[in-house]
Image (tube, rainbow, N blue to C red):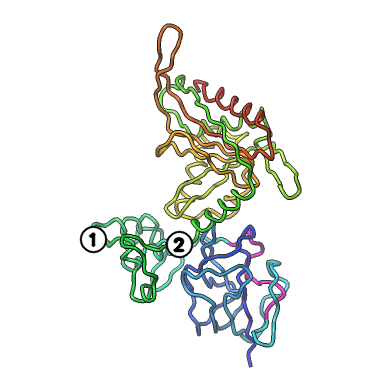
Amino acid sequence: MAEVKLFRLPDLGEGLPDAEIVEWHKQVGEHVALDENLVSMETAKAVVEVPSPYSGRLVKVYGQARDVIETGKPLCEIELDAGPQRAEAHDTGHHGSGASSAEPSADSGTVVGAMQSSNEVVHSAAVSIGGVRAMPAVRAMATKLGIDLRQVRASGPDGSVSMEDLKRHAARPDAPPPSLRSASPEASAGAPVVPAGGQVEALRGLRRNMARAMAEAHAQVVPTTLCDDADISAWQGAQDITLRLVQALVAASTAVPALNAHFDGQNATRTLHARVDVGLAIDTEEGLLVAALRHCERRAGAELRAEIDQLRRGALARELPPEALRDYTLMLSNFGMYAGRYATPVVTPPCVAILAAGRARWQSLPVMGGFEARRMLPLSLTFDHRACTGGEAARFLAVLLKDLARAA
């Protein structure tokens, strides 16, 4: 009798606790080749293609689309082909519970085919399923919107359905609202009764991770917020506010390194960073992503702007790799592009500071002999009071104000 292997969900990056099934690329009973894409999984940070660790027949799956699987829990079972398979030592190092007489044999670790480490798991190639080519992120969005990709007009590379194609399809006047598109007899059967006008919605993907991260930050960080207004009246012509904020953070981090740091609360250690990697908060329809703008201290304005645009496009398309979404040294939220003046932004460990910028406005200020109209940019600086003092934060903010007041 052919040997059956149990494949456990590997760590898809940065110790994430779980992932959501977007779509199986193989059905039970079908043959899957070694390293062939087996299933698309949506983690808290990206949509990931998981390749098969074996060559054989898929005999069992432990979840369907939109089911959440915990890291290390069974994902599927594969009946091995005759002949050599991948060496058992080629795994991620994530150890499962081992085999028992009641289940197929399990490896000492979670074998993940061609993935050599959790940081190299993301593949961005469009996958053809049911005759429709689309990126994993597009399939994830289509599932959540209840849209059949076969009905979407494709304009992407090689005839694939792009995220813009999907958005155009969803925006059609004749398209039903998402709440109706996602409803089905199967989904509504046995659903809980909710008040009129309300709909129960399970948090998934980015939103689930955001809720978890905010709860952890609330439990760990001792936040304090300082607010002030930067006088940007000297700015000439159109100015890139986000770029100016990044450059001001570099100046402030150079003068007061205490806020460009990581703090380890368990071991009571602080790491001051010479490099300035700014975590840009990017608002997407699926939730909040924080993308790392690397080495801001040594890059020119034009190069930084190009990278900001690239990060934003990647975030909106859910195509950023996991390494682009971690290891920033401090954070920036420019919520003023929408509305609002001041805020109490949330610091997520291990960072110790986040700067939030509100909506710039003209304000009448008293001067000797009368009043002047000045353009003001409201700033809110939240810092972890365990890692730095109020004096350090105030001096950091003072440098920000001075740098932003420059004409250019």
Disc 1 designates what residue? 174
Task: Give residue 277's position: percent from left, percent from top.
Answer: 61, 41
Of 123 and 399, nearer the camera is 399
Question: Which quarter of the picture shows residue 278?
Answer: top right
Q: Give the side of residue 388 with respect to residue 346, left or right.
A: right
Mark 2: which secondary structure?
A: loop
Disc 2 designates what residue? 135
The overriding secondary structure of the stretch rendered in magenta is loop
Task: Give residue 145's position: percent from left, percent from top.
Answer: 37, 62
Of 27 and 187, nearer the camera is 187
Mark 1: which secondary structure?
A: loop
Between the C-alphas of marks 2 and 1, the distance is 25 Å
So how many labels did they put on this image? 2
State the extent of the magenta-drawn residues as a range.
Answer: 106-121
Does the magenta portion include 154? no
Task: Give residue 144's position: percent from left, percent from top.
Answer: 40, 63
| Badge 2 or badge 1: first in the primary sequence | 2
Residue visible at 62% across and 34% down in the picture: 297
- Can you tell which of label 2 and label 1 is closer to the viewer? 1
Does the magenta portion include 109? yes
Amino acid carrying label 1: it is Asp
Q: Residues within 10 Å of mark 2 (few under 14, many from 20)?
A: many
Amino acid carrying label 2: it is Met
Residue visible at 62% across and 76% down in the picture: 7
Q: Residue furthest left?
A: 174
Residue visible at 63% across and 42% down in the picture: 222
Question: Which quarter of the picture shows residue 156?
Answer: bottom left
Q: Quadrant of the N terminus?
A: bottom right
Residue visible at 46% across and 39% down in the picture: 335
Whether residue 276 is situated above or below residue 157 in the rendered picture: above
Instruction: Residue 26: give its label.
Output: none
